[in-house]
Amino acid sequence: MASYQALRRARLKDLRVAEQHVEASAWASFSPAESPSLRVMQYNILADAMSDDGFLVRPVLANWPVPEKCVPTAAGDQVEFRTLLAEMMEAKGNPQALEKCQQKYTCNASAENTNAVIDWEARKLQICCLIESFNPDIIVFAELDHYSEFLLCLRELGYESQLEQCKKEHPDYRPALLDSFSDKDPTASKGFAATWAARGYAFLPHLGSISLHTYMQRGLGKRILEAAGPEFKERLMDPKKGCLQRNWYQALPPGKVAQLLQSAGVETPATVDDMGVAVFWKTSRLNALDLQVQPYPGGGKGILQLKLKDKQSDATFAILGTHLSSGDTLQDEDERLNREILCQGGLVAAVEEAKNAGNAVILCMDANSHPGIRTSGESSWKVLRQCLGASVWDDFFDAEGKPKKIQSEFDPPVTSNKVRGPLSAQAEKIGSHAYYLIDHIFFDPVFFELEAHAFEPKQFRSPADALEEVQPSLLNPSDHYPVIADLIFKAGGAKFC
């Protein structure tokens, strides 16, 4: 761990982070999973392109101009952090009050502080330190928009993310956008899935992702339109917004994307990528046998399925990773159920197909859905738990998604604890507290049982208490907490494939 910790320390020093915060955010080593337990990690790492959205973060700078329990104002005054929270919550839903709040607290010190917390290089190094600390056997990332970087970093730590049999023909990872892949219609989707799986990389990009679109809006999209010329500019431009359309590269012939990126000033086009879901496995413990890619109907996201073999027990099992569409309204939940979970070619069908083939199945996901949400009696939690049979959250929620009556002073666990603060460009979202359990590991109880949570579930006495520890932070470099659980291959269960 020393190398990544040393690199991280140097980076945080350059960002002028106080030494005590660097020390306090260093991950200690945790006990590895007891053999034959399988340690599984699900982690939405917060896409680099999505991180600069004004998240409210705690002060970490060495030159923070006010006491650490306070925040500076644009007028040069100071208020307590809890006062800022109270003002944001009171202004929520009131555009004029939100604008005043934004003007009051927007200042250089707060911007520098936020940039230090969300800095990509420091966050990437901290994620590597986290992995070294917990030593998972399987890692499933969501919102990864620098897959090629993690491919190099995690190979150094003993992980792999490409099938061995594909390495000779496809030795270098190539982002999907460079080949103008599309998954918007059944024919294009089928062609993309087959070609992409043949390359053997356990990464499923969300074609036309919101993260890439956000990145393009910071100047690169304008330069691409300027470089496109009359032949391509019209087909690449969003006619309503006058900017680069979200699925721009799907309107270009293969090879043209790299040319435009270079003309727009991107020296190495392969560094530009969509965000997506990735799976990494520890090579000392597991072999990867097969990879399948299944976009959801209509495209944009999908299911990454990997068949793995445990070297200790010779058992094989399927690990599925996915990231469902965002939104916390009932309509959003309905869309997840109808377009991604219960539809033909959806998640339930993929799980059932894997189970019918005799596979033990583990499903890791950011569902963007908490157990208690309901639409017409159904929910993502209820449907998927019924389909798989068990969840690592079964100690806290029943099969219907209702919190179990546990004698505790704490709320049930959450995996999201974030607030957009005064620096957010989305003024209407300032003060909205995302305090939910939306990241999941489901599994087939015929083959597995939960031994323990390696990463202790995050619980707070109340949402108000949770606001004192909003994410991201130096310790946890994402707006989601990781889910890290030890599963036991069940003795006496049905025989593995």
Image: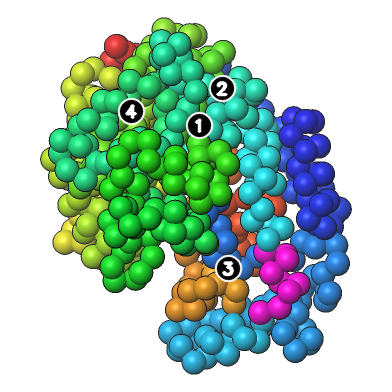
Q: Which residue is mark 4?
A: 196
**Mark 4 to mark 1: distance in Å?**
20 Å
The answer to whether residue 213 is left or right of residue 254 is right
Residue 184's quadrant in the figure? top left
Q: Foreground: 62 or 401?
A: 62
Q: Residues within 10 Å of mark 4 (few under 14, many from 20)?
A: many
Q: Earlier in the sequence, mark 4 or mark 2?
A: 2
Question: Does the magenta portion include 111?
Answer: yes
Q: Is residue 494 visible?
A: yes
Residue receiving disc 1: 139
The amino acid at mark 2 is: Tyr
Whether residues under marks 1 and 2 lie with C-beta atoms below 8 angstroms apart, the answer is yes
Q: Where are the magenta residues, as a range? A: 106-114
Viewer-nearest of discs 4 and 1:
4
Decide whether the magenta segment is chiefly helix, strand or loop: helix
Whole-angstrom CA distance, mark 4 to mark 2, is 20 Å
User: In the structure shown, which secondary structural element does the residue marked by tag 2 occupy?
Assistant: strand
